[in-house]
C-alpha cells in the first residue's frame, strides 16, 4: 500500500428516535469498531484512532486521519514461462506477444518474475486509489449492517430497517460534507440538539468541533463515558449532602447514562417509616423500578433518601423532586403492604400451600420438590457431618417464600424474603441464612453460600433439578438451556471445590434419584449416567476460564473425575508438574508406553515375573516402580498429588535407561509379555494421578 497524501478526521452521526438503553453502549462500540474495520478494508486508514459517541438519540463515531483518497493498489498478472516466451534467437514467441497485447502493453514493457520454480513474464500496474467520497458511504452502511440488532424495524413507506427510525445523518470529512445516503437519509452537517434545552438544530462546521458544538448549542453531552462520569460525580455529591453516600451500581449507572443526554441529579427523600420494610425490597423499588440511586450510611444501612437523574434542568427543581417522591412513596407503600401482609403467616404455613404450585408437569409440585430436597439435604448433611436438624428445617421452608406477596412483587428477592420471614417467625439464624443462601450462586461466578447448611441446601436443590429434568428428558440441546442446567451444574462443582466438600458426583446423583424413586418416578441408569456426565463436562468450561490448559484438563479427566475437589487437586498438581525439568522426558516416555501398550495385540500379564528379568535396566526399572508405588501411595491417599508427581519425576533416569538399553518387543513371547507387564505397571502409576501422555510438549522449568 503506497502512502496517501491528505488526511482529515471523519465524523459520522446517525440520528434516531430514542434507542433502547440496555443496548446503547454495545451498539456504540460495535458501530465504532465496524466503521474502523470497513474504512481500513477500503484503504482509507491504517491503525485508526476512533472515538465513539452515544446518547439516547444518536450513534456517532469520529475516526482520525482518514485519507481523502484510497491507497493505490499494485496489481500483478503472470504470463507464460520465460522458456516459452522467447525462441532460440531471443525473439518473443506468439505466447509472449499475445500476453502483452492482452495487457495493453508491448513485450518490452513486461517484467520477469523469478521464483524457486522458475521464471515467468509478469505485468505489473498501479491502480489509483478511489476517492474517499465514493468509499465512505458504503463503509458506513457496512458497519450499520453488522450491528448486533436482534430485531430491526421499518418506518414510514421505505424499506430500510434499523433498531429505531432514522431522522438525520451527519457525515463530515474534515469540513466537507461527504455526499451519501444511508438508511434512506441523505447526509449533511446539521445535527439536532436537546429536545427541550438546546437549539433544535446544530450546525457542525468540522468533524473536530462535534462535541463542542453539541454541548454549547445543543445542550448535549454526546460522549457516553463523559456523561457517565458526570452522573457519578453529581450522585456522589448529593449522597454526601443527604448525610451518607450514594451507592453507584455499575449496571444502573450504564442504564441511566443511556437514558439522558445531559444529566441533572436531583436529591429526594421518602418516609422513614418505610425503613421497617426489608431494605432489599426498598432498594429494588428504587433501583430496578425507578432507576434511582439509593443512599446508605457509614455502616451500610439504608437512609430515607434517593437520587434521580433528570434529562432536563428544571426551572422548578422542587416540583421535580416532589413528583419523584410522590411516585416512589406510592411504590414503597405497596412494598410495605406486601411485607405486613406476608408477616401475618409463618413460612411453615405457606409451605403447606406449595402443593398447589407446579414445579414441572412430569416432576410434580413445589411441595414434592421440597420433600425431595429435605431427604437429599439430610443425606448430604450426614455425609459431611453438618447439622442435620438445621439442614432439614431449612429445606422444609426454603421454597415457602415463593408464594409470598413480596416475592410476587420482587421476584429477584426469592430467598432473601425467606430469610426475613424466617427471622420474623423466630427460626434460628442458621436456618434463616440457609434459606437465602440456597439460591447461591445466582449467576456464573457469583458468590457462594458461606454457611454449611446453605451449601447443603444449594447442592440438594440443584441436584434435584438436574436429575429430575434429565428423567423428564429436558436436558439441554445445542445452545438452548431453558432451565439453566449448565449454570446449576457449574454451581454444584464450584460449591464442592471452593468449599472443600469431597463428595462423589455420581453418588450425589444416585441419592437425588432415590428421592424421585420414593415418589414413584424411577430414574433409569441412562438418565443417571447422562446427568453425571453432564455435570462433569462442566469441568472444562470452568477451568479454561480459570486459566488451565485444555491438555491439562484432558489429562486429569482421563484418570477419572467423579469427585470435583479431587479433580481440582490433581489438575493443579499437573499444571505445576508440566514445568518440572523432568516433565518433557516423562511425558514423551508416557506417550511411548501408551502407544506400545495400545498396539500390542497379546494378553499382558497383571504381574511381573521377576525371574524373567535379565537386563540390568529392566531390573532397575522394576525395583524403582515397586519402591515408587510404595512411596506415593500415602501422598495419593491424602490428595497430595504434587508430592506424588515429584516422586514419579524421580523415575526419569531409569525410564530413559530402560528405553535406551532394552528391547521391549523381544523375540521370546514370555520375555516380551513380562516387559509389557512392567510398562503396564509404570503406566498405572501415572494414571493414578493423570494421563500425562496427553500433555503437549511442555517447556522445561527449574522444577
Image (cartoon, rainbow, N blue to C red):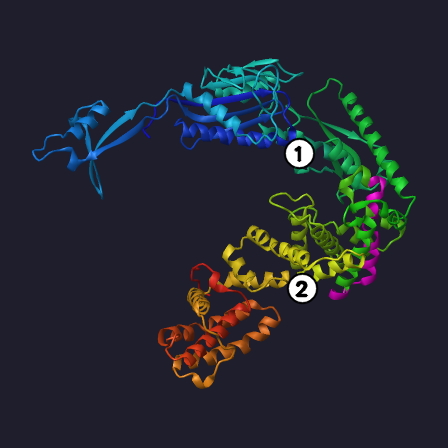
Which residue is painted at 57% across and 14% down in the image?
202
Q: In the rendered view, does 160 fall on the left or right side of 673?
A: right
Magenta extent: 382-406
Residue under the image location 83 percent in, 61 percent down: 389
For the N terminus, the quadrant is: top left
Q: Residues within 10 Å of mark 1 (few under 14, many from 20)?
A: some
On the image, the x and y values in percent for residue 450 come to 73, 55
* Residue depicted at x 13% and y 33%: 86
Compare marks 1 and 2 and give the one earlier in the sequence: 1
Q: Answer above or below: position of 125 versus 175.
A: below
Counting the numbered discs, the total is 2
Residue extending farthest to the bottom is 611
Q: Residue under circle 1? A: 253
Q: Nearer the viewer, residue 444 or 374?
A: 374
Does the image show residue 549? no
Q: Is residue 402 magenta?
A: yes
- Residue 629, position in %: x, y? 53, 76
Closer mark to the observer between disc 1 and disc 2: 2
- The answer to whether residue 660 is left or right of residue 276 is left
The residue at which mark 2 appears reads as: 502
Depth order, front residue of 555/700: 555
Graded by Cα atoms within 10 Å as few (under 14), some (14 to 19) or many (20 or more), the crowding at tag 2 reads: some
Amino acid at each position: 500500500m503506497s502512502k496517501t497524501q491528505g488526511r482529515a478526521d471523519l465524523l459520522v452521526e446517525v440520528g434516531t428516535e430514542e434507542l433502547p438503553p440496555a443496548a446503547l453502549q454495545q451498539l456504540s462500540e460495535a458501530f465504532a469498531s465496524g466503521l474502523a474495520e470497513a474504512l481500513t478494508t477500503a484503504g482509507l486508514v491504517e491503525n485508526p484512532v476512533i472515538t465513539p459517541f452515544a446518547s439516547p438519540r444518536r450513534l456517532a463515531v469520529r475516526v482520525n486521519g482518514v485519507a481523502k483518497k484510497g491507497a493505490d493498489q499494485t496489481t500483478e498478472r503472470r504470463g507464460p514461462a520465460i522458456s516459452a516466451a522467447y525462441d532460440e534467437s531471443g525473439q518473443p514467441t506468439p505466447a509472449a506477444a499475445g500476453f502483452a497485447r492482452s495487457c495493453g502493453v508491448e513485450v518490452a514493457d513486461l517484467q520477469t518474475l523469478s521464483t524457486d520454480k522458475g521464471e515467468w513474464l509478469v505485468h505489473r500496474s498501479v491502480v489509483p486509489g478511489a476517492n474517499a467520497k465514493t468509499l465512505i458511504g458504503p463503509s458506513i452502511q457496512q458497519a450499520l449492517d453488522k450491528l448486533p440488532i436482534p430485531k430491526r424495524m421499518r418506518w414510514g413507506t421505505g424499506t430500510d430497517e434499523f433498531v429505531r427510525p432514522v431522522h438525520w445523518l451527519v457525515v463530515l470529512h474534515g469540513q466537507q460534507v461527504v455526499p451519501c445516503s444511508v438508511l434512506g437519509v441523505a447526509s449533511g452537517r446539521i445535527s439536532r440538539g436537546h429536545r427541550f434545552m438546546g437549539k433544535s438544530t446544530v450546525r457542525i462546521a468540522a468533524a473536530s468541533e462535534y462535541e463542542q458544538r453539541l454541548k454549547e448549542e445543543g445542550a448535549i453531552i454526546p460522549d457516553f463515558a463523559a456523561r457517565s462520569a458526570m452522573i457519578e460525580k453529581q450522585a456522589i455529591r448529593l449522597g454526601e449532602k443527604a448525610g451518607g453516600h450514594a451507592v453507584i451500581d455499575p449496571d444502573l449507572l450504564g442504564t441511566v447514562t443511556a437514558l439522558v443526554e445531559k444529566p441533572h441529579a436531583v436529591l429526594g427523600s421518602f418516609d422513614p417509616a418505610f425503613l421497617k420494610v426489608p431494605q432489599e425490597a426498598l432498594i429494588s423499588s428504587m433501583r430496578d423500578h425507578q432507576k434511582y440511586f439509593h443512599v446508605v450510611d457509614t455502616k451500610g444501612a439504608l437512609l430515607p433518601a434517593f437520587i434521580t437523574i433528570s434529562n432536563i434542568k428544571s426551572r422548578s427543581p422542587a416540583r421535580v423532586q416532589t413528583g419523584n417522591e410522590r411516585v416512589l412513596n406510592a411504590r414503597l407503600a405497596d412494598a410495605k403492604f406486601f411485607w405486613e401482609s406476608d408477616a401475618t403467616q409463618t413460612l411453615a404455613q405457606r409451605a403447606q400451600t406449595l402443593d398447589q404450585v407446579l414445579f414441572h408437569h412430569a416432576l410434580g409440585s413445589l411441595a414434592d420438590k421440597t420433600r425431595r430436597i429435605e431427604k437429599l439435604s439430610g443425606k448430604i448433611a450426614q455425609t459431611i457431618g453438618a447439622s442435620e436438624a438445621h439442614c432439614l428445617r431449612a429445606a422444609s421452608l426454603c421454597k415457602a417464600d415463593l408464594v409470598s406477596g413480596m416475592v410476587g412483587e420482587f421476584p429477584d428477592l426469592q430467598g432473601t424474603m425467606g430469610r426475613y420471614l424466617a427471622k420474623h417467625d423466630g427460626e434460628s439464624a442458621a436456618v434463616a441464612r440457609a434459606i437465602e443462601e440456597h439460591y447461591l450462586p445466582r449467576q456464573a461466578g457469583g458468590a457462594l453460600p458461606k454457611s454449611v447448611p446453605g451449601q447443603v441446601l444449594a447442592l440438594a436443590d440443584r441436584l434435584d433439578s438436574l436429575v429430575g429434568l434429565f428423567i423428564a428428558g429436558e436436558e439441554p440441546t445445542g445452545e438452548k438451556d431453558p432451565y439453566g442446567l449448565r449454570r446449576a451444574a457449574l454451581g454444584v462443582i464450584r460449591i464442592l471445590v471452593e468449599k472443600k466438600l469431597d463428595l462423589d458426583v455420581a453418588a450425589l446423583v444416585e441419592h437425588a434419584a432415590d428421592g424421585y424413586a420414593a415418589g414413584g418416578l424411577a430414574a433409569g441408569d441412562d438418565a443417571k449416567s447422562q446427568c453425571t456426565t453432564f455435570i462433569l463436562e462442566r469441568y472444562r468450561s470452568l477451568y479454561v476460564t480459570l486459566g488451565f490448559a485444555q491438555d491439562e484438563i484432558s489429562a486429569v479427566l482421563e484418570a477419572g473425575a467423579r469427585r470435583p475437589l479431587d479433580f481440582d487437586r490433581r489438575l493443579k498438581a499437573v499444571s505445576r508438574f508440566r514445568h518440572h525439568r523432568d516433565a518433557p522426558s516423562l511425558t514423551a516416555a508416557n506417550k511411548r508406553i501408551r502407544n506400545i501398550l495400545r498396539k500390542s495385540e497379546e494378553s499382558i500379564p497383571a504381574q511381573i515375573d521377576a525371574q524373567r528379568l535379565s537386563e540390568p535396566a529392566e531390573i532397575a526399572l522394576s525395583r524403582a516402580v515397586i519402591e515408587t508405588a510404595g512411596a506415593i501411595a500415602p501422598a495419593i491417599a491424602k490428595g497430595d498429588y504434587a508430592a506424588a508427581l515429584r516422586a514419579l519425576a524421580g523415575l526419569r533416569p531409569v525410564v530413559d535407561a530402560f528405553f535406551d538399553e532394552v528391547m521391549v518387543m523381544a523375540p521370546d513371547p514370555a520375555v516380551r509379555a513380562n516387559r509389557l507387564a512392567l510398562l503396564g505397571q509404570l503406566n498405572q502409576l501415572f494414571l493414578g494421578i493423570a494421563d500425562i501422555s496427553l500433555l503437549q510438549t511442555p517447556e522445561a522449568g527449574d522444577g
